Image (tube, grey):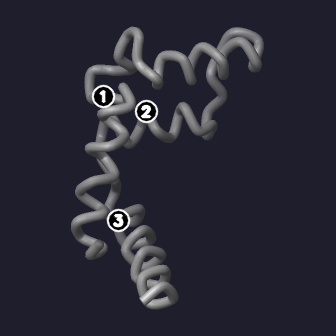
Amino acid sequence: VPAGVALVGIPVAIGALGFTSAGIAAGSFAAKMMSVAAIANGGGVAAGSAVAVLQSVGAAGLSAGAQLGLSSALGALGGAVG
């Protein structure tokens, strides 16, 4: 899979899990993750946690820095596999 295709697919996949621009979709996998994280953390979701990061990506997409880092990582992975 070319890195560009993977970068487009990441936000789409995150959205499909329920991390959307409007927030976490009720009844979704994301909602279940958020519930587990909140219970484990005493009622709130910790900043920087997987749930928080995925919601940020779902809400705003990937930053230029994140895209560059993922492109580099995916390129290296493709070189190692190919």
Residue 58 is situated, as x and y percent measured from the top left of the image, at: 34, 36
Q: Is residue 73 above or below residue 26?
A: below
Residue at the image point whose x is 27% and y is 54% from the top: 9
Q: Which residue bears the numbered disc 3?
A: 67
How far from the left and from the top, in percent, is residue 77? 48, 80
Q: Amino acid at mark 2?
A: Gln
N-terminal-most mark, 3 or 1:
1
Say which quadrant the C terminus sits in. bottom left
Picture layout, residue 3 above or below residue 9: below
**Residue picked out by circle 1:** 20
Residue 3, given in percent of the width and then of the height, sits at 30, 73
Q: Secondary structure at mark 3?
A: helix
Sort mark 2 into few (<14), some (14-19) or many (20+) by Cα contacts within 10 Å.
Answer: many
Q: Residue drawn at (42%, 82%), measured in percent from left and top?
A: 78
- Binning the other alpha carbons within 10 Å of mark 3 as few (below 14), some (14 to 19) or many (20 upward) gives some
- Residue under numbered circle 2: 55
The amino acid on which the numbered mark 3 sits, given as a three-letter code, is: Gln
Indicate left or right for 36 with 69 as reference.
Answer: right
